[in-house]
Structures are given as C-alpha cells and as structure tokens.
Image: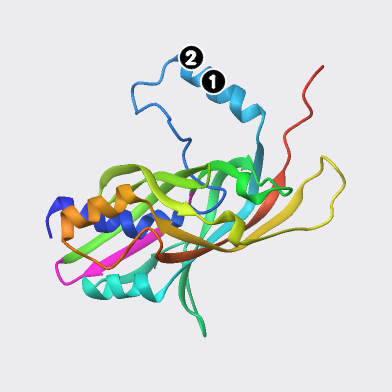
Amino acid sequence: MSTTRRTVLGAALAAPLLGQLTGTAAGAAPAGQDGPTGRAARAARAARLGSLSEGWVEVRWTPAAQAQLDRYQAVVEEIAPARMVHDERGAAVRLPVRTAQGDPSTADPAKAHGDGSLDGGVTLRTSEGTFRIVNVAGALTDGVASGRCEVGGADMGHRSVFRCGLEEGTLTAEPAPPGQPVRVRVSQVPLRATQEVLDTLTTSFGPHPVTVDTVLAYVTAEGLYTPPPPARE
C-alpha cells in the first residue's frame, strides 16, 4: 500500500475518533509558525471556554463503513488505554479524553464547539501491512470536524473531514447549580464525510459508493464539563 493510500485510509478511519468535544483548534498555526500573537489569541479564546474532564469518546461504525474496511481487508484493533466494545449493535472503539475545552451548547446542540485530544488509538491491520493511528486530535466548528493524527509514524491532518449531525443526536445534562461542573453526554451523533474527503478517497482508491449523505459512524461522548469563570466587569 503506497504512503498516500495508507495515509488516506488512516485518515478515513481516524477521523470519527475526533468526537463531539475533542480535537485541536481549527485554524491553528502549523508547528514552528506560532508566534506571540497566535498564542495570545488562543489564550483569550480558552478563557471563554469550559473544560472537559473524566471524559471518553465512543465511535460505532456503520455497516457502510464496515463494507469499506472489508473492501481493503482491514481489521481494527485498539491501542490502550482505548478499548473495543462489542455488543448486539456491532463493534465500537472507546477512547479516553486527554484534554478538551469547548462549549457543549446545551440550549442548542447544533452550536456546540470545542477542541482537545484523545489517549490511545487504533491499529489498522491490512493484507499489505499494519498501521498505528495515535495522537488523535481535532476540532469541531459549525458542525464540521477537522483534525490531526499520526499514522504509521507520520503526522497528518485534514482541515475538513466529517459533518457532525449534532441536531440528530441526543444531548443530556445532569442537574447542577449554575456555574458548577455538570456531567454531559451526547449520544448517537451521525458522521458523514465531507466532499473534500470523498474527493481524496476517489483520487486515491477509485470509485466507491460513499456519498456526502452516507452515515459512516455514530459518536457518543461523555464527560464532566466545567464552565468558564464569569467574565470580569
């Protein structure tokens, strides 16, 4: 499998792991090109966002996604502390949240946004080799997930990977006093590939049945959300 094909397949598999409240900041400066202005802007942004702890992200791929894995004779295995989940609904992978910040927007889930990173990863075993996908990170902005990961030791990233059907999922929050930490959970959020990713897949692998309307995975995420401190007068 060529480096390009391997990287694209790795991206297609890793992208759903970006989750609802995880990832690296959208539009972040490339490594080595971040100056004081960029750091100050991110610090100001972080002060307006809450943080997520004790969290995890679970990705359950659909039969459509499994068909594409089967097409490339690919088998998914977890890298600790991630773990595989098998039940009557099929297979899923659950990864702990390493760091995350954002706004779950409990009043309007479609406006949820955030960034962070995940612990663990997955191994992709194919007839042409075995590839580790780790250091998964990404961002959620305007319902579109973007992100980065390491595939087989090579850093890679995509600006636009998946459209998250936030309004199609379910958001629940345990009762808590205003301004206090609250446990939140988003369930069954469908992920659909962006046209950008589909074009890359077509170029690398040829024709395929996946379209922008194909649901490739469902994401469930949970964590303890701590709101940002009140703004000073």
Element on which disc 2 rests: helix
Whether the magenta-drawn stretch holds residue 120 is answered as yes
Residue at point 42%, 59% (across, down): 192
Say whether residue 137 is visible.
Answer: yes
Picture layout, residue 145 above or below residue 228: below
- Kindly identify the residue that appears in the image at 34 percent across and 60 percent down: 13
Q: Are marks 1 and 2 in contact (CB under 8 Å)?
A: yes
Q: Amino acid at mark 2?
A: Thr
> Viewer-proximal residue, 40 or 78?
40
- Circle on res. 41: 1
In three-dimensional space, the C-alpha distance between marks 1 and 2, rounded to whole angstroms, equals 6 Å
Give the residue displayed 13% in from the left and 60% down from the top.
1
Looking at the rendering, the stretch of residues picked out in magenta corresponds to: 118-128
Q: Which residue is mark 2?
A: 37
- Where's residue 196, x and y in %? 31, 47
In the image as oriented, which residue stretches furthest toward the right?
Answer: 177
Q: Residues within 10 Å of mark 1 (few under 14, many from 20)?
A: few
On whether residue 210 falls in the magenta region, the answer is no
Viewer-nearest residue: 193 or 172: 193
What's the amino acid at mark 1?
A: Ala
Q: Nearer the viewer, residue 23 or 104?
A: 104
